[in-house]
Image (cartoon, rainbow, N blue to C red):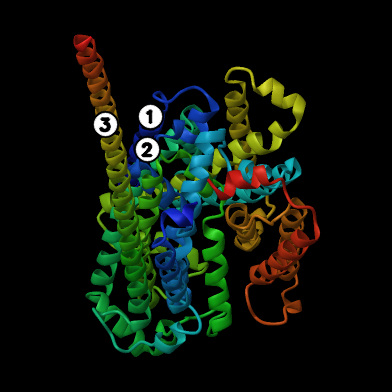
Amino acid sequence: MYSVQQPSKKPVVRWFIAFLVLIQFSLIWPIYPLVGYIEPIILGMPFSIVWVLLCLLLSFSGLLAYFLWEEQGQKRQGQEQQRQQQQSHDVRAKVEQSKILTKDTTTNVSFSGGVKS
Amino acid sequence: MSDTWIIVGISIGYLLLSLVMGIVPGLKVSKSSEGYVAGDRSMNLLLLYFVLGASIFSSFAFLGGPGWAYSRGVAALYIIAYGTLGMVPLYFFGPRARRMGVKYGYLTQAELLSERYQSPFLSILLAILTVVVLIPYLTLQMKGAGLVLNTISDGAIPYWLGAAMAYGVVLLYVFFSGVMGVGWTNTFQGIFMLSIAWFLGLYLPKELHGGIGPMFEAIQQEGLGNMLQAPGLQSDGSSWSWAGFSSAVMISAIGFSMWPHFFMKTFAAKDDRTMKLTVVLYPTFQLFLLPILFIGFSAILSFPGIEPADTILPYVLRNMDLPVVLVGLVCAGTLAASMSSGDAILHAAGAVFVRDGLRKFPQLRTAMDQKNVERKVIQLSILLISILAYYFAVISSTDIVSLLLGAYGGVAQLFPLVFAMFYWPSATRLGALTALISGIFVTLVFLFWPELKPWDIHEGIYGLMVNLFSLITVSFLTQKTDSSIVEKFTHA
């Protein structure tokens, strides 16, 4: 039921998890050994330190983006539901209205019938 | 002499402030266990952020962190590396656990696990393991507090009194206010230690070397470049292997969110959004370790040869001509780091011991179901646990702190069980029990006999391999768990 409701959610979750795995491996073997040197020095810090900070920053941005995306999705879903409810409400109202109308016509008919007789 | 008393005065002022901050908020929550253990499930973002942030940064952060950077160079980055993603599992598990807590009244991690795997034995096992691991952890925090007050007062406050003062305050607010006491004091202590850490981390390199850039340049020029080259050094001064570094980061990242005093805070979150946002904002807390490491780096050339390396921060403070008020504030900041972890650990140990241990015995359960009896039993356990930890910290010479060495490897063994609880319907009781027990067993074997390891990787990784293998094979071989129970979790 979960996946039926949100067909678009699954690929994003997969990308997000792939992103997290990439970050994790950037902090250890095999990616960190490729870049964990002293040069280039940035802001006075050896690159081995800068790299870890970059990963921290990247994971923070990724998490924040995913959180906002999820939250927006929920909002959209909420609006969707509201619209659906609104629609079904409208339909019901129309049905009710038409019922009243038909009732009116029948009474009218019976009334006019009564007059006729 | 008068300088010493100014420093001690600032520390005592800090302790009193912590006491007030800790006692007052507890008056607002209900007198039930739910109020005492999970703050009536009402924690907002600010509280939860600081509870989770400050409880992980213990006296290790202020004493061990600089010590690592001082003696092992960038190997200390390991702490930032595992924390970067260590919290992320709670983004997924946290909201589910929280919703189940609201629905069924759960307050601890083991309550979830024992329901999913239908095993009171699992619950009692986890309760015992939790207490066995948390007591040395608490002992370590007490030792840190005692050490700091003792060194900074030039011995005027004996070690036993320092530990007793700091943890007397902790005991008081945890005893009376439960988790809300932990929450508000951690917020105060967290802000306090963050400010101190940033100030010191920028001030010391400037004072000793003229800035961060010149500091690293000087280290390199002195021929210590290998300290700055990832992954840094081992404690004996030789280069750390990539396998050693990577596996240590992995196992700590996996174990991070599984700590019982950490995971159970998900039940205190006000709503799912708060829980998720806390995880999202967590890296901002991690960043605070950077200045902490700078403290250690700044001392490498200026104060060589200090043993043990953990005492480098108090040593620097005593041997530099720093304004006395600053020394007092740093001293209080270190106490804050120790206490903000100690309180959460003490509280969790008591709560887990009663909820997951004692309550699983039917006779005790009926007795505790009476009004607020359970809360009183938890309070009593908290008192006993702190006395026991104090005994190990001050009186006994048993080195129980080395128990902690195996703790991260052991705690990580919970991860497959928690993951399968929510995402793998086929996991069974026997699968979970064999996985946990075999995982911990293997971890301990390789911890005590490291020469048996086939490769030089963290013992917890071996444990985890055996753990996963047993979980999967045994689960396939045994009777499935009732689907009505499993669905409560997979659809949570």
Badge 3 vs badge 2, beta-carbon distance below 8 Å: no
- Of circles 1 and 3, the one toward us is 3
Q: Do marks 2 and 1 share a chain?
A: yes
User: Could you tell me how many numbered marks the image carries?
Assistant: 3
Q: CA distance from mark 3 to mark 2?
A: 52 Å
**Residue designated by label 2:** B184
Secondary structure beneath disc 3?
Answer: helix
Q: Amino acid at mark 2?
A: Trp
Q: Amino acid at mark 3?
A: Ala
Q: CA distance from mark 1 to mark 3?
A: 51 Å
Judge whether residue B109 can be spotted in this image. Answer: no
Coordinates of residue B341 in the picture (x, y in percent) = 48, 48
**Residue designated by label 3:** A93
Residue at x 62% of width, y 39% of height: B352
Left or right: B105 as drawn, with respect to B114: left
Coordinates of residue B383 in the picture (x, y in percent) = 59, 32
Judge whether residue B71 can be spotted in this image. Answer: yes
Secondary structure beneath disc 1?
Answer: helix
- Chain hosting mark 3: A
User: Which quadrant holds residue B107?
Assistant: top right
- Chain hosting mark 2: B
What label does residue A67 carry, if any? none
Up-down relation of residue B199 to residue B328 (above or below): below
Up-down relation of residue B1 to residue A39 (above or below): above
Residue at x 70% of width, y 47% of height: B117
Badge 2 vs badge 1, beta-carbon distance below 8 Å: yes
What label does residue B25 carry, if any? 1
Q: Amino acid at mark 1?
A: Pro
